[in-house]
Amino acid sequence: MKKYILTFLISVLAINLNCQAQTNFLRNNQNSERLQNEQPSAFSIWFDKHIQRYVGFGFGPETGIALFLPKFSFYNFQNRRFFETYFGIEGTMGMIYPVWFSLNGLYGVKKNIFTFDTSLGAWYFPRQTFGSETGAFHSVVGPYFQITLNPKIGIKLGYFWLKAGPSFHLYRNYNHQTLGSIGRIGNMYFNFELLIKLGSR
């Protein structure tokens, strides 16, 4: 009798160990599959390795008034023998009334803390109504569209990048003089911006 009981207990123990082994095997496979599914894509790895990301505040024909939301910039820097070159894209979208949009591409050079770049940018202000139709301050503004060439010199210190320069209109079409005067000082137009780098790259 004792022999049968001992055999039964050993059988139960063996079955239990086998079940635990199968459970651990399945759990390890599931964890492995989850890790494989969670691995970043090749584009994500390249983007994190090569692209510097910035947010910032700008004023001028290139961006209008970039405050809420701020200006978003993405740069790729390349080391040369005596300096660095970079190119990138930037954009803004005004979300607090009134609303506007801007997009530009740029190319520049960097030596130590000094930078020089030039962008080709487009700024669009859709048709918008201000005030009530029966109010004294009712007005319809827009649409407004312009394309500008924007050379800027800058100083890049750590996470901060300050840039400024003149702006030249290549094309503009607007029906409201105030929109066309953003960044105007005397008879010329200027852009000013402060960018803050995101991340540690």
Image (tube, grey):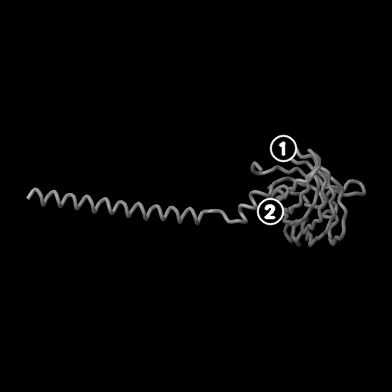
The label on residue 27 is none
Amino acid type at circle 1 is Gly
Q: Position of residue 3 (x, y in %)?
A: 10, 49
Q: Earlier in the sequence, mark 1 or mark 2?
A: 2
Which numbered mark, 1 or 2, is in the foreground of this view?
1
Residue at image location 79% in from the left, 61% down from the top? 142
Q: Position of residue 69 (x, y in %)?
A: 69, 50
Depth check: give the residue in front, 155 or 33.
33
Residue at image location 49% in from the left, 55% down from the top? 36
Q: Position of residue 72 (x, y in %)?
A: 70, 50
- Read off the residue under disc 1: 158
The residue positioned farthest toward the left in the image shown: 1
- Read off the residue under disc 2: 95
Describe the element under mark 2 as helix, strand or loop.
loop
Task: Assign the C terminus to one quadrant of the image.
Answer: top right
Describe the element under mark 1 as helix, strand or loop.
loop
The picture quadrant where one finds residue 111 is: top right
How far separated are the C-alphas under marks 1 and 2?
A: 29 Å
Whether pointer 1 and pointer 2 mark residues with C-beta atoms closer than 8 Å, the reply is no
Amino acid type at circle 2 is Met
Report the number of discs. Answer: 2
Few, some or many C-alpha atoms within 10 Å of disc 1 (few <14, some 14-19, many ≥20)?
A: few
Q: Is residue 28 left or right of residue 131?
A: left
Residue at image location 19% in from the left, 53% down from the top? 11
Q: Position of residue 52 (x, y in %)?
A: 69, 47
